[in-house]
Image: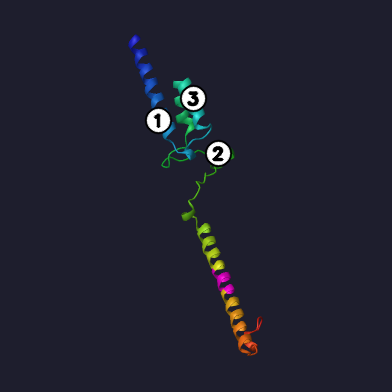
Amino acid sequence: MARLYVLLFLVQIVLAVCALISCLSAEEGQVRGLPRIAWVLVILIFPLVGSIAWFVAGREPAAGRPRAAGPLGRPPAERRRPVAPDDDPEFLSSLAERSREQDRELFRRWEEDLRRREDDLRRKEGDPPREDDRPGA
């Protein structure tokens, strides 16, 4: 009988170690129900029950397994992981648009500066400004 208790104790310890490794190595989006630190405390304080609870309710199901239906039979909402800026098409298009807008503004300022300098040169030489050079023409 003592051997059975030792065997069950060892199984409980192995299960708790596996649950701790699984809990600590899970990504942030895979931990559900409680915060990670709470799961670690539950596993350490209640090794058998905490380990079983972690494997049943604490982690997201693997991608290969079908997910259980949520309340009212609907599938649970997918958790979206943050997208890196260089992978986000909206961010990249906004950068391109911002760059085009800055280029347009720079080009507009250059044209205004060039017109102003041409007008200044014409005034110095005594030539009247031409019709097509006036702003708004």
Q: Residue at x 56, y 74 (%)?
A: 110
Density class for disc 3 (Cα within 10 Å; few <14, some 14-19, many ≥20) is few
* Number of dots carrying numbers: 3
Q: Does 24 lie within the magenta span?
A: no
Residue 1 visible in the current orientation: no
Sequence-wise, which precedes: disc 1 or disc 2?
A: 1
Residue denoted by label 3: 41
The span picked out in magenta is 103-109
Q: Quadrant of residue 21?
A: top left
Side (left or right) of 8 relative to 113: left
Could you say whether the residue bearing mark 3 is in a helix, strand or loop? helix
Q: Residue at x 51, y 35 (%)?
A: 32
- Amino acid on which the number 2 mark rests in the picture: Gly
Single out the mark in the foreground, 1 or 2.
1
Q: Quadrant of the N terminus?
A: top left
Residue denoted by label 2: 70
- Mark 1 and mark 2: span between their CA atoms? 27 Å
Could you say whether the residue bearing mark 1 is in a helix, strand or loop? helix
Which of 23/135 is in front? 135
Sequence-wise, which precedes: disc 3 or disc 2?
A: 3
Q: Main secondary structure of the magenta part?
A: helix
